Amino acid sequence: MKNNIIALAQALIQRPSISPKDGGCQQLIAEKLQAVGFNIEWLPFGDTLNLWATHGIGEPCLAFAGHTDVVPVGDESHWDHPPFSAEIIDDMLYGRGAADMKGSLSAMVVACEQFVRDNPNHIGKIGLLITSDEEAVAKDGTVKVVETLMQRQEPIHYCVVGEPSSAKQLGDTIKNGRRGSITANLYIQGIQGHVAYPHLADNPVHKALPFLTELTQYQWDQGNEFFPPTSLQIANIHAGTGSNNVIPGELYVQFNLRYSTEVNDEIIKAKVAEMLEKHQFSYRIEWNLSGKPFLTAKGLLVESAVKAVQKITGISPLLETGGGTSDGRFIAQMGAEVIEFGPLNKTIHKVNECVAIEDLAKCGEVYYHIAHSLLQAVR
């Protein structure tokens, strides 16, 4: 599978696909899958292209999920190799998306191709859910495909997301969950005035300081076996006109919580409202829930993935839930067991993004063995 994985990865990287553009990547993938008997279904929403490719019928349904969109490259002059050239130097494949995640996406596609060639009569269904809207707003991608599948009662029982999960060496980490993410945009009202006449104004920055101290010091939970304690960070703060003699009339504070399964978004909103009311100032707050936390306990998917990683890499992977969000949060809403496994994440979104070609080959083998295990095929 190695040569086919690398060839496909290069072809995908050479197609610029800044989110939410696909750049022809999914068409190339669809043609390859259709050639081995996959049913191809296009599910476009807005500017986003989504592909749902399946082989087989019935249960269980094992899906491999990934995205063809990538983040911008920045100043190309800072790259040692053109970001869309897909050059291989010293057994490393360079290019935007090499690690996140056209490399592992290629490994998933080739693994699925090989699996159905070897096992044309496998039980259940194997699928690939691919979107071009993961790196940006994530509004018309996987979330919309999941809504469509749920509406027509088409389940996914197991899902492997190809996000780069490995930290120091391939196989050292499998993500079996992710923290939730919720952002607040808070506007605290005051009265604008001259700094020399504070009795005629009401400074919202001064009023907010005790609240902000309480907010940032509050202990939400202690975490649990798989999740660290919930974390709150102020991301942006602004007040004033830019002049040194004007008391601001409004303070804007944006803060984000990455939260564990020990709390939920309703608990967070209620507690923040309680704090705000206690400090007795006029405010308005807008909440944006990016994703709820999910956790896949040890079961068939986790066991199959751990065994596959051990077999191919010789490493016993750590199960953990750190990092940002992924499209796994949407698929988990279907009641599916969801994990993330892929190559090293140390160069993702960076200049000179790259991945070891041997790691991509091993990813393909891991994906193949997971499919073989869960669909009970005889190799």
Image (cartoon, helix red, strand yellow):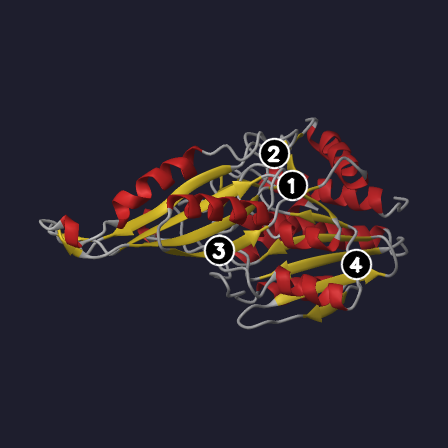
Mark 3 vs mark 2: give the one in front: 3
Residue 109 appearing in the image: no
Frontmost of labels 2 and 1 is: 2
Residue 287: mark in rendering = 3
Mark 4: few/some/many CA within 10 Å (<14, 14-19, 20+): some
Give the farthest residue toward the left: 196
The quarter holding residue 267 reads: top right
Q: Is residue 195 left or right of residue 87?
A: left
Q: Give me the C-alpha separation between circle 3 and circle 2.
A: 23 Å
Kind of residue at badge 1 = Gly
Amino acid type, callout 2: Phe
- Residue located beneath label 1 in the image: 177
- Relative to residue 78, is residue 327 drawn left or right? right
2 or 1: tag closer to the N-terminus: 1
Q: Nearer the viewer, residue 129 or 206?
A: 206
Residue in view at x 90 percent, y 44 percent? 378
Mark 3 near mark 2, Cβ–Cβ under 8 Å?
A: no
Where is residue 271 shown, x and y percent of the image?
51, 44
Task: Assess whether mark 2 and mark 4 are in contact (beta carbons under 8 angstroms).
Answer: no
Residue in the foreground of this view, choosing between 345 and 150: 150
Residue occupied by mark 4: 155
N-terminal-most mark, 4 or 2 = 4
Cα–Cα gap, marks 1 and 4: 19 Å
Label 1 or label 3, whichever comes before in sequence order: 1
The amino acid marked with disc number 4 is Pro
Camera-side residue of 1 and 203 = 203
Residue 332 seen from this side = yes
Sequence order check, earlier mark of 4 and 3 = 4
Up/down of 33 relative to 178, above or below:
below
Is 36 located above or below residue 269 in the figure? Answer: below
Marks 2 and 1: CB-CB under 8 Å? yes
Q: CA distance from mark 4 to mark 3?
A: 30 Å
